[in-house]
Image (spheres, rainbow, N blue to C red):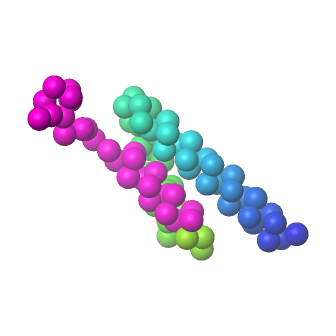
């Protein structure tokens, strides 16, 4: 029962991190969500789950994204 609960919590947390990563694709949302980077870093340090650590790192990476190298595809040759 306990391992099922841990697995369920891990699945929920994974889904939540994926949601944050997806929402952070919008620049205005990303700026607001950046306040949570400290919590995500703590999750990387404290989690025993490799999946949660990886997802937390990916979410941090998306939240720290600044700009694209080309603003318009016309600039790409």
Extreme-bottom residue of the structure = 48
Residue positioned 44% across, 38% down in the render: 24
- Above or below residue 6? Residue 64 is above
Position of 23 with respect to 3 (left or right) is left
Position of 32 with respect to 67 (left or right) is right
Residue positioned 46% across, 51% down in the render: 59
Residue positioned 25% across, 38% down in the render: 67
Q: Quadrant of the N terminus?
A: bottom right
Position of 61 with respect to 3 (left or right) is left
- Above or below residue 1? Residue 32 is above
Q: Is residue 38 visible?
A: no
Q: Quadrant of the C terminus?
A: top left
Toward the viewer: 39 or 77?
77
Q: Which residues are magenta?
A: 51-77
Q: Is residue 73 magenta?
A: yes
For residue 3, which quarter of the picture? bottom right
Q: Is residue 1 visible?
A: yes
x and y, in percent, of residue 27 in the image: 37, 31
Residue positioned 68% across, 60% down in the render: 10
For residue 57, which quarter of the picture? bottom left
x and y, in percent, of residue 4 in the image: 81, 66
x and y, in percent, of residue 48 in the image: 60, 74
């Amino acid at each position: 029962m306990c391992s099922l609960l841990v697995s369920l919590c891990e699945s929920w947390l994974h889904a939540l991190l994926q949601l944050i990563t997806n929402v952070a694709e919008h620049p205005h949302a990303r700026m607001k969500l950046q306040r949570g980077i400290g919590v995500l870093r703590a999750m990387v340090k404290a989690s025993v789950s490799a999946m949660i650590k990886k997802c937390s790192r990916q979410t941090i990476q998306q939240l720290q994204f600044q700009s694209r190298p080309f603003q318009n595809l016309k600039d790409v040759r």
